[in-house]
Image: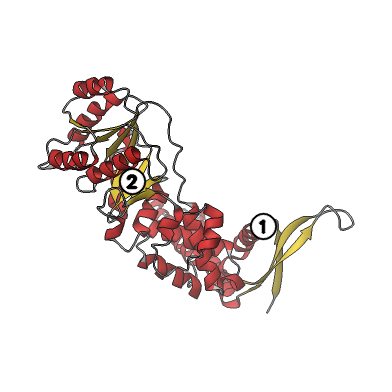
């Protein structure tokens, strides 16, 4: 068996060199850190050296396929030289193209997953992560870990957990202006009205990191049966004024009338994201809020990843600053949410996990998501040191 060595600046760079030169026939044995360049042992840079061997079967198979392709080329040239019929030549070209394509697929086909990668994939499936996001994490693990490191599943899974947390974007800094206008949009049934009530209570009482402020609630959801009664009930309990409007003109007049109010919270019509006409009408009404309004999209944690991505896209015209993830108490899997946020580059600002006002709401934090994942070992002290305490 022939042992070979390749060096480079990083593990990824060396691995790409090896794969480009030897393909699937190359089997990595070990990795070590080396010093490259410099003078008399000084000023050198740290690099990586991989030791590997070539799998004979893979080499012979590759050579056979290359030889077969060369034979096809030679036959094609002979046919052209002998003035073969054009149709026959074209058929041979098509056959050769198919042979090359099939050969490329076979040579580049991934090997059977390492047991740790297979276990990681199962763990991600159990937590309802999307296919695209699983492929991304597994490809990153294959590229970043040596074979020895892959044997340590705890290392692989804990590192993957950190990669997931890194993809959870930090909430944008709040704007400071008066009045502070917060608008909640989203599909029907995600809990917008209850969330508005929770935010109203937090701002009114000065809880959850908010300063005690004068608050007013506004609803434009006068179409849904019981919607006005629900928000008026919350408002009565908290002694917070509430108004119902149906047009941009009414909203503009109300905002002007109460411009001295410190926080104004607006509950919107719950419509299907596919109801483009109603969404356009609602957007037109909300334009009365001006560019300073902070719009947030509420989505349920029980929504499937493809549906959540559709919702993100359909509500883009509202220029929402972030997400409110609701109903975390109704599911034990959050991979769907994390996958959608990572794939679309969205930020979660608040999380809700129940109907109690104002208890069941909190500011988003990576650990809030990680601690809901099943099967992963969450090293809370280490993760809090990296992402901040809850």
Q: Is residue 291 shown above or below 77?
A: above
The reply to whether discs 2 and 1 touch (Cβ–Cβ < 8 Å) is: no
Looking at marks 2 and 1 on the same chain, the residue that comes earlier in the sequence is marked by: 1
Nearer-the-camera pick, 227 or 121: 227
- When asked about the image quadrant of residue 204, the answer is top left
**Residue topped by disc 1:** 10
Nearer-the-camera pick, 324 or 236: 236
Q: Residue at x 42, y 70 (%)?
A: 375
- When asked about the image quadrant of residue 184, the answer is top left
Which residue of the protein is positioned furthest toward the right in this rendering?
40
For the question of whether residue 12 can be seen, the reply is yes
Mark 1 Cα-neighbour bin, 10 Å: few <14, some 14–19, many ≥20: some
* Secondary structure of residue under mark 1: loop
Q: Which of marks 2 and 1 is in front?
A: 2
Q: Is residue 222 shown above or below 83?
A: above
Cα distance between the residues tagged 2 and 1 = 40 Å
The percent coordinates of residue 317 (x first, y second) are 31, 33
Q: Is residue 249 shown above or below 369?
A: above
The percent coordinates of residue 150 (x first, y second) are 56, 71
Q: Is residue 29 shown above or below 97?
A: below
For the question of whether residue 270 can be seen, the reply is no
Total labels: the figure holds: 2
**Residue topped by disc 2:** 324
Which residue of the protein is positioned furthest toward the left in this rendering?
225
The percent coordinates of residue 384 (x first, y second) are 52, 57
The percent coordinates of residue 46 (x first, y second) are 74, 57
């Amino acid at each position: 068996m022939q042992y070979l060595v390749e060096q480079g600046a990083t593990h990824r760079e060396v691995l790409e060199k090896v794969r480009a030169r030897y393909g699937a026939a190359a089997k990595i044995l070990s990795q070590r850190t080396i010093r490259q360049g410099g003078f008399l042992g000084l000023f050198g840079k740290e690099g990586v050296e991989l030791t590997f061997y070539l799998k004979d079967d893979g080499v012979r198979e590759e050579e056979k396929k290359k030889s077969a392709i060369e034979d096809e080329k030679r036959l094609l040239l002979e046919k052209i030289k002998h003035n073969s019929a054009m149709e026959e030549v074209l058929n041979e070209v098509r056959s050769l193209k198919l042979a090359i394509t099939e050969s490329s697929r076979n040579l580049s086909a991934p090997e059977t997953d390492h047991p740790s990668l297979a276990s990681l994939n199962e763990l991600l499936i159990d937590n309802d992560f999307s296919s695209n996001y699983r492929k991304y994490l597994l490809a990153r693990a294959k590229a970043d870990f040596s074979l020895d490191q892959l044997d340590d599943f705890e290392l692989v899974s804990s590192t993957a957990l950190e990669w997931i947390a890194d993809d959870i974007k930090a909430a944008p800094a709040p704007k400071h202006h008066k009045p502070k206008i917060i608008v909640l949009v989203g599909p029907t049934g995600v809990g917008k009205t209850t969330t508005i009530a929770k935010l109203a209570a937090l701002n009114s009482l000065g809880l959850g990191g908010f300063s005690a402020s004068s608050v007013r609630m506004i609803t434009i959801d006068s179409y849904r049966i019981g919607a006005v009664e629900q928000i008026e009930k919350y408002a009565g309990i908290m002694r917070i004024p509430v108004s119902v409007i149906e047009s941009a003109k009414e909203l503009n007049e109300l905002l002007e009338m109460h411009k001295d109010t410190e926080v104004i919270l607006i509950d919107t019509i719950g419509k299907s994201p596919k109801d483009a006409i109603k969404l356009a009408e609602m957007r037109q009404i909300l334009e009365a809020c001006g560019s300073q309004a902070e719009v947030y999209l509420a989505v349920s944690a029980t929504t499937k990843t493809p549906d959540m991505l559709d919702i993100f896209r359909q509500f883009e015209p509202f220029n929402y600053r972030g997400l409110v993830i609701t109903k975390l108490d109704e599911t034990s899997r959050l991979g769907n949410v994390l996958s959608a946020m990572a794939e679309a580059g969205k930020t979660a600002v608040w999380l809700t996990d129940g109907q109690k006002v104002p208890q069941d709401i909190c500011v988003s934090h990576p650990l809030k998501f990680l601690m809901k994942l099943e099967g992963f070992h969450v090293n809370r002290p280490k993760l809090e040191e990296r992402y901040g305490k809850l």
